[in-house]
Amino acid sequence: MGRKFAIAAWLISAISLTGGIAAAQEPPKGEPHPAATAQRGEPHPTVHGYQRVAPPAGWSTRPQTVDRAAYQHNYQAPRSFQIGPYHPPAGWSAHHWVYGQVLPRAYWVPAYIIADYWLFGLEVPPIGYEWVRDGADALLVNTANGEILQVEYGVFA
């Protein structure tokens, strides 16, 4: 009987010891288990929904005159942005444009105008000009005659 009692006492102490260890590993009531948090990721302390980037000062103050020599460039964009699919105007496909060429009128519609040009690192367009998208490129276009004043290649991925 003494041996059975010793084994039973040992089992009880082992169970108590294991239970005590398990209890020490459990988080306090009301907090998620660390393993569950690791799988889902913990909530970010500062981000609560989408907050639109504010436009920089002077973004809507367009230059009154155009210094053509200052604008006439074909640049490679320093970085690319992914903003969604691009669909060219009906009957057209993306083209490698250069300044001095004339962009077809089909591209001067609101679907292709880049109204938030500052989000993509594009310069403020002078009065009478707009940035438009053609494929991955941004083109600064004279809205009176379609002449391309500047090109930024690879603005969009």
Image (spheres, rainbow, N blue to C red):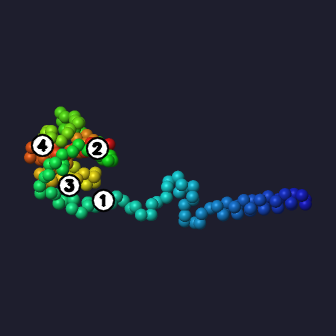
Taking the spot 77% from the left edge, 59% from the top edge, the residue there is 14
The quarter of the picture where residue 74 lies is: top left
Quadrant housing the N terminus: bottom right
Q: Position of residue 49 (x, y in %)?
A: 36, 59
Q: Which of the two discs, 2 and 1, labels the residue nearer the N terminus?
A: 1
Residue type at mark 4 is Gly
Q: Which of the two discs, 2 and 4, labels the residue nearer the N terminus?
A: 2
- Give the residue pinned by disc 4: 146
Residue type at mark 2 is Gln
For marks 3 and 2, give the one nearer the viewer. Answer: 2
Q: Position of residue 8 (x, y in %)?
A: 82, 59
For marks 1 and 4, give the one nearer the viewer. Answer: 4
- Give the residue pinned by disc 1: 53
Q: Nearer the viewer, residue 98 or 146?
A: 98
Residue type at mark 1 is Val
Q: Is residue 106 visible?
A: no
Q: Secondary structure at mark 1?
A: loop
Instruction: Calculate the distance from the C-alpha at mark 2 to the C-alpha at mark 4.
Output: 21 Å
- Give the residue pinned by disc 3: 124
Whether residues under marks 2 and 1 lie with C-beta atoms below 8 angstroms apart, the answer is: no
For marks 2 and 1, give the one nearer the viewer. Answer: 2
Q: Is residue 131 visible?
A: yes
